[in-house]
Amino acid sequence: MVIERAALRWPATACVFVVATWLNMHLQPQLDGRAPLLPYFPALVIVGLLCGIGPAVTLLIASVLAVLYFWIEPIGAILPITRLADVELIALFIGSGALVAAVSARAGRLTRKEKLGRQRLSLAVAAGRMVTWDWSRHDGYATTAGAPKEIFGRDWATMEDMLASLSDDDRASFLDRYRYASEAGGRFSLVALIHRSDEGQDVWAQFDGHVVLDAKGRALHAYGVVVDITVQQEALRASQFAEQRFELALHSGKVMAWEADAQARYTWAVNVPFGIHRDALIGAEVGSIARQPEFAKTVLESIRSGRPLTVSQTAAYRGEELQLLTSMKPVVGDDGTVRRVLGATVDVTELTRAQARLQHESQLKDTFLATLAHELRNPMAPIRYSVDVLRRRTNDGESLKVLDVIARQSAHMARLLDDLLDMSRITRNAIELKRELVDLRAVVKQALDAVEPLYVQKQHRVALSLPPQPIMVDGDSTRLQQVLGNLLSNAAKYSPVPGEVRVDLEVDGSHGKVSVIDRGIGIAPEHQGRVFELFSRVDSSGAAPTGLGIGLAVSRQLVELHGGTISVSSDGPGHGSRFIVCLPLAAQADARARAGLSEAAPVPDAQGTRVLVVDDNKDGADTLAAALNDVGFEAEVAYSGEAALDAYDAGRHDVVLLDVGLPGLSGLDVARHLRRLAGQEVVLIAITGWGQPHDRMATASAGFDAHLVKPVEFSVLNATIRDLTRASHRGASGKP
């Protein structure tokens, strides 16, 4: 036992000194004073071991003084020593005592270190969940340190106890390795499962042993350690499973993960494509196997710049063209230089081909929709023109009601066709705006005029609130009318008959705000968030809603293209709805509006205006000409491009209404010929079933002044002819 606390060492030294002196005083009378130093030698050993060198030296000095005082002549006095023999005795005692003290103190220090080492070893054994063992070959018994029962389920008294919980194969493997080590000497190792019978669980254990041989090369004994590595094995297996899942994910996604050094050479790769072996890739320059030297330059550029890059590549391998997408990220060291590059390359060949197929199919769909709209618009045009003619020539009330039905339903069909084409444009983000300075008051009035027949039929009343000053926005008047027309049509359809719809226009900060408020069926709160989605048709009344369910989706797209917002609010079913459209006001709108209020040119009288109607649809051409003649125009017809040129040579018409899709000489060719022949003296208006943006560009480049899509409202056509002829007269008169 070593006294660890320094405060106890000195009292212990004093006690030892007192006991040694007391013992000496009782022994010396019996020994006739022949060995006064004898009790102090064991005292020095005890103090040196337990208390250290300092207390031992102190005890040595005290012992010398005690001997001089009690047993050296003259008794009772420490000095002077009268005999040389006494001097030699004291000197010998001091020398031997110092040696005993030093050796004892050294032994004490070693004992303390050994104890500390055992404590550390025990702590390490416990913390590392390990058991040390020492097995004697002669008696077969094993000594252990640690807690084998706690860790592995049983105590180990012999080698057989240690191996009893192993499987037969693992036991045989251990003995084979031990036998080999016994013959050659040295270390052996084994990882095996130990079955804990007390808990019914398996514990992963690593056996490490060493066999010591005697001088004749025979096994003397063996020692070693058994470590519980269950946590490490489970972590290793989890890591292996994670790596397998990672490789599976890479394989499923056709992704190659790779790493390259600062010279753009592969140093690591997983899931290498093209049937290339991984070893063939390591050390090769990136892109070399797939014959992509430019890719190596891209990687080197990433290394030089230190910036992540994403590049698309077209690679060729064994005659097959592949589309690849690579993302790479340089890894920068502490010194700021790029040490390596991490990358992932995805084979997007199938995706690229699928996208190309989808794009092709989308183009086919758009072509089909445009063709369908064109073919449906052609027969609708003469129907609407005929209605306009009959309205002016009929005074019978019942007949007028029937004509109103035809007009409303044909207008509804036209709107459905427009919505169908707009849906296609929305999905491709292909809606284009013809921006100009627009007064929202005029847009609201024009939208109300367009839905007036529906409101008359439904017996609805419109409460309109407009400000006295212009509210100017930079927008497409036709598209804004379409937005408000959708809102007004929905308000009429979903309001009780008769009902009231309120339309308010006001300035809200830097925006113009249009509110359309009805007292109709309302919208439940959970449905308000999806009314602007494609094909969303919400009817709280339970009746089947009409339409395609795309009008509000088109409206939202158009408003957002104008930089505005559209929103809806409702207190729920039966409480009506409020739709609000906010559009940013145009910059310097007031000045531009005042500049646009110039003196209008006089509107030319239709009387005497000669119009040539050209359409291969005879019914359409004849009914349109009849409608024009009824309002004072002098209209003629031609059913082909060639006939149109002959008719113009004979009549020199003021306005030519041309169908673009004429057989033989197309409407575009006719327009170009007339522009070369008459210049700006003739007004050219395209009336066609084709209304895509590229169709409008084609007519504009051919020299047309306007592009109208069938079926055209006769009032719109009449106003267009008058506006264009007024502009023509203004230019001829020299007015700006």
Image (cartoon, helix red, strand yellow):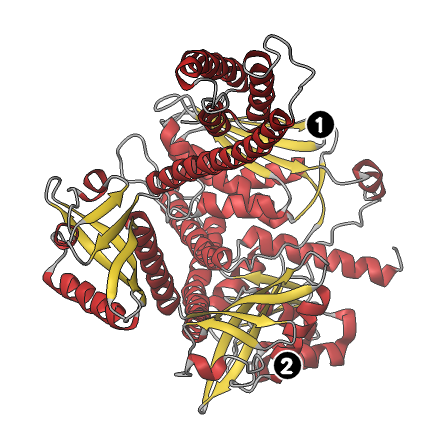
Image quarter hosting the C terminus? bottom right
Q: Secondary structure at mark 2?
A: helix
Q: Nearer the viewer, residue 403 or 490?
A: 490
- Vertical position of residue 469 compared to residue 24: above or below: below
Q: Secondary structure at mark 1?
A: loop
Amino acid type for the residue under numbered disc 1: Gly
Give residue 339's position: percent from left, percent from top. 64, 66
Give residue 354's position: percent from left, percent from top. 41, 72
Image marks 2 and 1: residues in contact by CB distance under 8 Å: no
Is residue 683 among the parts visible in the rendering? Answer: no
Within the image, what quadrant is residue 480 found in?
A: top right
| Residue 509, numbered label | 1
Q: CA distance from mark 2 to mark 1?
A: 55 Å
Image quarter hosting the N terminus? top left
Name the residue carrying label 2.
294
- Vertical position of residue 2 compared to residue 408: above or below: above
Foreground: disc 2 or disc 1: 2
Residue at image location 81% in from the left, 36% down from the top: 590
Amino acid type for the residue under numbered disc 2: Glu
Q: Nearer the viewer, residue 557 or 415?
A: 557
Is residue 49 among the parts visible in the rendering? Answer: yes
